[in-house]
Image (cartoon, grey):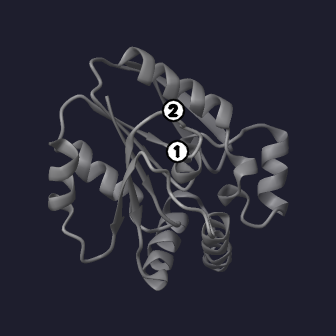
């Protein structure tokens, strides 16, 4: 099974790139870390009072994500699809069986963090490096439309999330058994995909 991680700050286009890749391949699946936030009362309270909560590791349900990830890697199938509702702070789980999975794409702001826990596995790592103002515009549009945030709050959240993302990985190098690609606005995606698929 080929494993692809797609990382980048909020609004950089991780989901868009994942969707572009998945339509080009057969037997592939996308796991978005955005669908694995913690739920319950503590999560509801922290998301209200802790600035940048959804960009911090404390918000990520690592245990549930690892369970789904390991099951797909081990069996080559996926049984459940998960969706996180930002307004209700709940995860909906749907029965959606997919068999003979050959490509697993992990995308989201926690993709890089999770990839560093894999010690004996080769994978492709794509990091999006997009202009801050462009990312901010996309993130605000998304937050207004999908997450019910007011514009001022969305702007503040983005600026905090940008700092959290880059501070988290400051002075940390990528693993040796990784094929790493930096994706900018001018990158030829088709050229990179050829390297991955061949």
Q: Nearer the viewer, mark 2 or mark 1?
A: 1
Q: In x, y percent, where is residue 103? A: 30, 34
Report which residue position mark 2 lands on: 82
What residue lies at 35% left-to-right and 19% top-to-bottom? 76
Q: Quadrant of residue 114?
A: top right
**138 left or right of 101 in image:** right
**Pointers 2 and 1 in contact (C-beta within 8 Å):** no
Q: Crowdedness of circle 1 by 10 Å Cα count: few (<14), some, many (20+)?
A: many
Judged from this view, the residue extending furthest toward the front is 176
Q: Does residue 106 lie above or below 70 as drawn? A: below
What is the CA distance from the residue labelled 2 to the residue labelled 1? 20 Å
The residue under the point 37% across, 18% down is 77
Q: Nearer the viewer, residue 101 or 151?
A: 101
Which of the two discs, 2 and 1, labels the residue nearer the N terminus?
Answer: 2
Q: Secondary structure at mark 2?
A: strand
Q: Nearer the viewer, residue 91 or 38?
A: 38
For this orientation, the residue located farthest to the top is: 75
Please determine whether, in this image, residue 42 is positioned above or below residue 26: below
Q: Quadrant of the N terminus?
A: top left
Left or right of 113 in this view: 39? right
Q: Residues within 10 Å of mark 2 (few under 14, many from 20)?
A: some
Residue 107: x and y, percent?
44, 49
Residue 71 is left or right of residue 150, and the answer is left
Question: From the viewer's perspective, is residue 104 above or below residue 112?
Answer: above
Residue found at x 55% / y 42%: 35
Name the residue beneath numbered marker 1.
115
Residue at 41% of width from left, 62% of height from top? Answer: 127
């Amino acid at each position: 099974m080929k494993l692809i991680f797609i990382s980048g700050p909020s609004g950089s286009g991780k989901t868009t790139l994942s969707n572009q890749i998945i339509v080009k391949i057969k037997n592939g699946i996308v796991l978005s870390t955005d669908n694995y936030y913690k739920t319950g009362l503590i999560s509801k309270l922290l998301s209200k009072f802790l600035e940048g909560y959804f960009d911090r590791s404390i918000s990520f349900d690592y245990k549930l994500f690892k369970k789904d990830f390991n099951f797909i890697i081990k069996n080559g199938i996926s049984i459940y699809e998960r969706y996180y509702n930002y307004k209700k702070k709940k995860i909906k789980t749907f029965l959606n069986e997919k068999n003979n999975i050959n490509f697993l794409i992990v995308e989201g702001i926690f993709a890089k963090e999770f990839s560093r826990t894999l010690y004996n596995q080769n994978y492709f790592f794509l990091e999006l490096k997009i202009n801050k103002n462009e990312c901010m515009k996309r993130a605000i549009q998304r937050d207004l439309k999908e997450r019910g945030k007011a514009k001022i709050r969305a702007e503040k959240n983005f600026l905090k999330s940008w700092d959290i993302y880059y501070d988290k990985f400051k002075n940390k190098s990528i693993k040796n058994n990784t094929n790493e690609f930096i994706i900018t606005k001018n990158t030829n995606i088709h050229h990179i995909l050829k390297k991955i698929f061949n």
